[in-house]
């Protein structure tokens, strides 16, 4: 079964699953017995579950079938980032489905390579790259030259095209940062046109550059190994400061216009829109307000798209979504819209 299919199972259903263990953390229950929090990813999504102390752990690599002791064996301790097979059951805990895994298999890593189970953006790499290049080409100088040089001559593109935008919650997959940045840019430029008609001027080049670069720091906050993981700088400095620092280094090295650099840098540091969400200053220009609004909307609509798509056909309202502090309603969108995606290209899914 896929993680998406498992998420649709009712209480008491049993299942087996093959995926990459993106997170495996040992904990202790109130009786001091060990248990593990595990997140498993496959091409359809990610599922979080528990492995209790009564569970069995096996190594099936090669022709072996060896019982593992998860408290002592290296083969069990090093399962994070490896492909695992799991057998489990859906149980109910505080009105929510919880997934208990009672058998854990370390499978043959050559036969089932972990990177083959890492989830990817549903939009094609080619369509996203084409739209990204178009967005840069549409800018005037000096922004166009600056973006072209930092992405394609300095090699930023290599990571940026593949990076995740998060480890969970939104766009937490290969290509997620690019998908999210393009979506924010598309929405922000539409707002520029819309507000021009309302008498509010905004510089489209600054908005495009700010939107494409707003989460630049995520290149240092996350890594793919092979699933999205938070780095130490990501944990203790985070992407706003990391991104601004990297951006200003690039500005200096490229000798980019300081007035424009300040306007774009302001978008990077203010894009979370409030101090409690990590921005040291609040958006103070029309360009920064537009990018910050587009970023927040993109995050919320991503959650809506994911949650509604995963909801059973007979339901109208999702379970409570903690990150948005609400249940989500399908509304009048009877079926999820087909993914039109970057440049209007057919989506891969
Ligand atoms: Fe951000
Ligand atoms: Fe963002």
Image (cartoon, grey):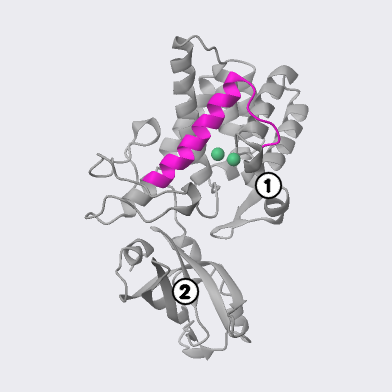
Q: Specify whether residue 276 is in view.
A: yes
Cβ atoms under marks 1 and 2 closer than 8 Å:
no
- Which label sits in the foreground, 1 or 2? 1
Whole-number angstrom distance, CA of label 1 to CA of label 2 = 30 Å
Name the residue rendered at 41%, 40% in the picture. 301
User: Residue 18, labelled with which disc?
Assistant: none
Instruction: Give the class, few, some or many, for how many residues have Cα within 10 Å of label 1's Cα (few <14, many ≥20).
Output: some
Q: Which residue is at a point 48% across and 88% down the rendered structure image?
A: 64
Label 2 residue SS: strand
Is 301 part of what is drawn in magenta?
yes
Frontmost residue, 35 versus 125:
35
At 51% from the left and 19% from the top, the residue drawn is: 138
Residue 48: give x, y in percent of width and height: 47, 66
Percent coordinates x, y for residue 216 in the rendering? 63, 39
Q: What residue sits right under mark 1 in the picture?
A: 238
35 part of magenta stretch: no
Q: Residues within 10 Å of mark 2 (few under 14, many from 20)?
A: many
Q: Is there any visible trace of residue 173 in the rendered image?
A: no
- Viewer-side residue, 275 vs 286: 275
- Picture coordinates of residue 332, whole percent (x, y): 24, 39
Q: Say whether disc 1 or disc 2 marks the residue closer to the N-terminus.
A: 2
Residue behind mark 2: 84
Q: Quadrant of ligand 2?
A: top right
State which region is magenta: 278-304
């Amino acid at each position: 079964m896929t993680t998406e299919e498992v998420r649709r199972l009712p209480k008491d259903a049993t299942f087996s699953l093959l995926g990459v263990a993106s997170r495996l953390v040992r904990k202790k229950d109130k009786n001091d017995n060990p248990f593990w929090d595990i997140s498993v990813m496959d091409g359809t999504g990610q599922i979080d579950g528990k492995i209790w102390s009564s569970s069995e752990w096996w190594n099936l690599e090669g022709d072996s079938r060896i019982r593992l002791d998860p408290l002592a064996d290296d083969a069990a301790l090093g399962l994070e980032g490896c492909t695992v097979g799991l057998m489990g059951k859906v149980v109910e805990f505080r009105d929510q489905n919880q997934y208990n895994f009672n058998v854990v298999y370390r499978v043959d890593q050559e036969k089932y390579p972990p990177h083959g189970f890492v989830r990817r953006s549903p939009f094609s790499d080619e369509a996203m790259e084409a739209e990204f290049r178009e967005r840069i080409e549409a800018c005037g100088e000096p922004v166009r030259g600056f973006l072209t040089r930092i992405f394609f001559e300095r090699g930023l593109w290599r990571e940026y095209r593949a990076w995740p935008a998060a480890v969970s919650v939104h766009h937490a997959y290969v290509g997620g940062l690019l998908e999210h940045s393009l979506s924010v840019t598309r929405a922000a430029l539409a707002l520029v046109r819309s507000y021009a008609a309302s008498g509010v001027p905004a510089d489209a080049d600054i908005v495009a550059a700010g939107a494409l670069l707003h989460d630049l720091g995520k290149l240092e906050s996350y890594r793919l190994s092979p699933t999205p993981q938070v780095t130490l700088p990501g944990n203790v400095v985070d992407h706003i400061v990391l991104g601004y620092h990297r951006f200003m280094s690039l500005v200096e090295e490229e000798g980019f216009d300081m007035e424009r650099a300040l306007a774009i840098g302001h978008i990077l540091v203010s894009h979370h829109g409030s101090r409690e969400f990590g921005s040291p200053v609040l958006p103070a220009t029309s360009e920064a307000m537009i990018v910050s609004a587009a970023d927040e909307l993109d995050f919320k609509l991503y959650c809506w798209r994911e949650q509604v798509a995963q909801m059973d056909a007979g339901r109208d309202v999702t379970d409570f979504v903690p990150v948005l502090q609400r249940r989500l309603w399908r509304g009048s969108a009877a079926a999820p819209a087909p993914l039109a995606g970057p440049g209007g290209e057919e989506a891969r899914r």
